[in-house]
Amino acid sequence: MDVLALISPAFFGLVAAGTVIGIFFGAIPGLTATMAVAVCLPLTYSMGLGTGLAFLLGLYVGGISGGLVPAVLLNIPGTPSSIATTFDGYPMARRGEGERALKIGICASLFGGLFSLVVLYLFAPPLADFAIKFSFVEKFLIILLALTLLAALGSGMLTGLFSGVLGMFVSLVGVYDINNGGNGDIRLVPGFLETWLESGFSLLPVLIGVFGLTAVLIEAEHGVREDAATKKLLLASGKPFRLSVFRGQWVNLLRSSAIGTFVGLLPGIGGSAASILAYSQEKTFNRKEPDAFGKGAPSGIIASESANNGLTGGALIPLLSLGIPGDATTAILIGAFTLQGIQVGPLFIGDNPGVWQAIVIAMLFANLCMVLVMLFAIRPIARVVMVPKYLLLPIILMMCVVGAYTINSGVMFDVWTMLAFGVFGWLIYKLRLDMAPFVIGFILGPSAEVYFVKSLESFGTLTIFFTKSWIAMLLWVLILASVTASVAIARAGARRARMAAAAEA
Amino acid sequence: MSAPSLLDVTIDFSTSHLVFPTIVGTLLVLMGAVLAVARRHEIRAALAGGIGWPTDMDGLRFFGTLVLTAVYFLAMNEIGWRWPNRGFGFLSASMPFLFAMSVLYLHERSRRHLMLAAVVAVLAPLVAWLVLFRLFDVSLP
Amino acid sequence: MNRRQFSVLGLIGGLAAAGFMPLSAGAQPLPDAIRMVIGSNAVSGDTYQNASIIAEALSAHLGIKVKVDAVGISEAFKAVGRDPRGTTVMFHHDQSYLSHLYGVRGFSDIFSAYKVGPVVSVNPGNAYLVPKQSPYQSVDDLLKAAADGTRIRVGIQAGGVSEIGYSALKNAARLAKPGSEANIVAVNSGSQADKNQQLFDGQVEVINGSVQANEQFTRLPDDDQKAMRFLWLTASREIIEEAPEAGFGQTSREQLLQYVTPAMRVTLDGQQDFVFDKDFFLLYNKDMPDEMVKAIDEALAAIYAKGDIQKTLKSSFFIPHFLPSQEAAAYLKTKDGNYRQVIEAIAAKN
């Protein structure tokens, strides 16, 4: 089919509509990009091929991008891939730079989105061939690389590592899922809880719990004080946004976008890993302001947001050139293609050049719409921090319930999971453990397990992790570099803290 | 074939669900022990002082939140069971929940504030229900 | 309250009133909103797609709301197991009893714990594939190699539709040369992506896949690392003959017929051939009233008699296969018996 036959004013209109609805889903805590695409999929049944795709791709880009809004303003990631945005976005908002943080995030998102789109357009088939060189062994090493962040991310190396390992442990509760290649047997569950815990804890309810509900509980503990004077300050009293903040960030932008695209390219690793990996790399290798991370460093937002939008183009590569989705959202897009009678697989691009071009055009336009809509909407959206807490917090709680309930199409246990992890998150905070490494451990735990165990099942020796391929060896070099750098950072941080303490005393 | 070495491992599929939890569990215990040693002074101080709740805690609002939330979930599930597949559980449980939470969090319960809380408590669940359940056909309890 | 606020309130009130309106006022035994849970979490898989087609047809025919929810297998069983009122029904496929036969944790016998509803369609695409350059041209080559002591690794997902064809191969090897079935071994992994990857890596000789997901890989040039070839489709000949003539992608029905019995035979017991059609059917709560069962049977019979649904199913490469509840239960029970035989035969030898 010719590309011009697919493109019409309605095509662009639907990209724009999709982007707006996507941003709406992404921006509400609990609702995600995946959900946006899933609930709107039936709406496309009656649309044509071009318009249906346009709408869904708009939703995808909008949903991933919208997640940064509550991450910055409320410290609740709107969508799992914006977790790393909270690390620096919220501290910035606290010191009155909310609008600046949002704008930095939006621009970084645009860069990441366009970068990955160029990569998608120019290199999809060769990259798909490269992606299949990553077997279980290499994928495990990539996850290991992401886990090296645990030590660097916490308030101290030990605390960070412990919290991370705890997260992994909790993620393994329940059955070893057959759908991931497991044997369907249950572990880490006491007998009397088996009916409840057999499916383990779902990712999204846990995230909503530890970010959303925990935030509400901490507020409640402190008595929910309204503080109108500081609120006015919060909105835009700090530094205004200037494009010059991106000066000197080229390496960060390119590296993070490339990491995002690359993680998207590898099926099974998952979207949230992209921004975390990019954030950790930026934190580890940033020489200028290593201490600023976690306290409101623009570089952190740039890394996280360019990576999660870099994912969008990357995840389409295996989808369109292997027929295999790169993340949860693109998995749903397969359904859309099938409904329209289009087969995705290694011959898709060659067989359907028109559809392929239409997809790229839709993605390009969606990214541009996203920036326009978000930049214009920023002021009214940022005013959400002005809503009195006694009204805002209950609404956040309600939306968290909606998100937890609907993520698996209506499972009440997920809602209770959210409550349990809300309390757990509050305890973590009280025990001075670290939330970020816990969450990262939780997210990466299940894939780390499958790839590690499957590698050993196939090869029967631990040496395979070193000898499988040149890619494996290269990954070890990166892992070692990352560990060395994070140890150095942690030591330097501890030394500075001691000196500061000594100076005070 | 090279001689079998210490690094060789055979994994039986039927017990493969225990491999990784064992490794992670061991690591967790080790890390926990190290952390406990590193924080021994704090722990000793905490134990000596007795494990009490933080004194500056707003107990009413904190535990009120927990209790109301649990009641909310139970009510939502129960109503949703009686009138299934309509989203009524969510709709009818959310309204009183939102209002009760607002009242709990308010410090100055003036008529104006209570009115505002009531309006929001009716409108917010209704809008969420209309948009998500009716328009997007999202499943709600 | 100013005028603008007033009109916003009015609008919301109006919408709310519209929202509460009942969908239908028909006097029928069925509730007016039914939740159809499926045993899969994926809203893009064949189960969801098939369930949506059926749900939409039922909804239009009966004037009630039927909503498909992808809650996953264990949640689906739980949801339908606690609701005898007909407001929750389950839509699934052969995995529901196969997993019980394979002894997967948490699966009970569907024939005693639930009520079997109508069978509605078949996904004819369940396939086994080899790399394009593989020396194995047929199942016989494979069995011969196993008999000669060559280890043949098959990439599958444990405990369900993906494993049953592997068990059949093992059983056929046992019948050809007792003991040789030990040379056919399973490599368990999860998604299609993982299975494909194992084939690319040379970690397995054969994978389970599907016509839908793997057809394009079979059309790649010989020297491509990703190129595959169909070895065997488990579907019965009658089912593939029902497929659209154009087949799937660029593989015609004529070509697909080369991979099913009798062109490609896997014996069940030395006389009959093993076939496996992946049937989709409804499962009800054990105590769901009979008049509801009857109402759904009648509705589906009328829908299938009209003939539009067949076109919809076929356009998504599903083969219509309608059996009302009673026949469906007997039919599935027979399948259950056949596969139990296969699974027990190979288990006894191990």
Image: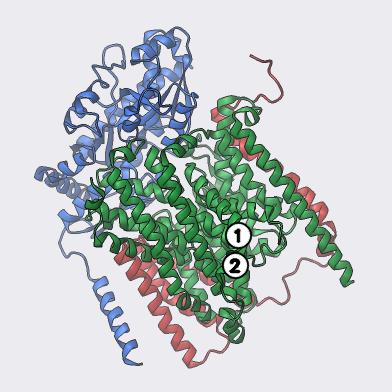
Which mark, residue A316?
A: none
Q: Which chain is blue?
A: C
Closest to the observer: A379 or C310? A379
- Left or right: residue A321 compared with residue C204: left
Reading the image, the residue beneath label 1 is A249
Cβ atoms under marks 1 and 2 closer than 8 Å: yes
Q: Can you give x and y, in whole percent of width and height, for residue A125 in the image?
A: 41, 38
**Which SS class for mark 2?**
helix
Q: Please state the chain letter of the residue tagged with numbered disc 1 in the rendered image.
A: A
Residue C34 x %, y %: 27, 56
- What is the chain identity of the residue bearing mark 2? A
Q: Position of residue C18 (x, y in %)?
A: 24, 73
Q: Which residue is mark 2?
A: A245
Q: Is residue A210 visible?
A: no
- Residue drawn at the location 59% of the way across and 29% of the way down: A469
| Chain letter, red | B
Q: Amino acid at mark 1?
A: Gln
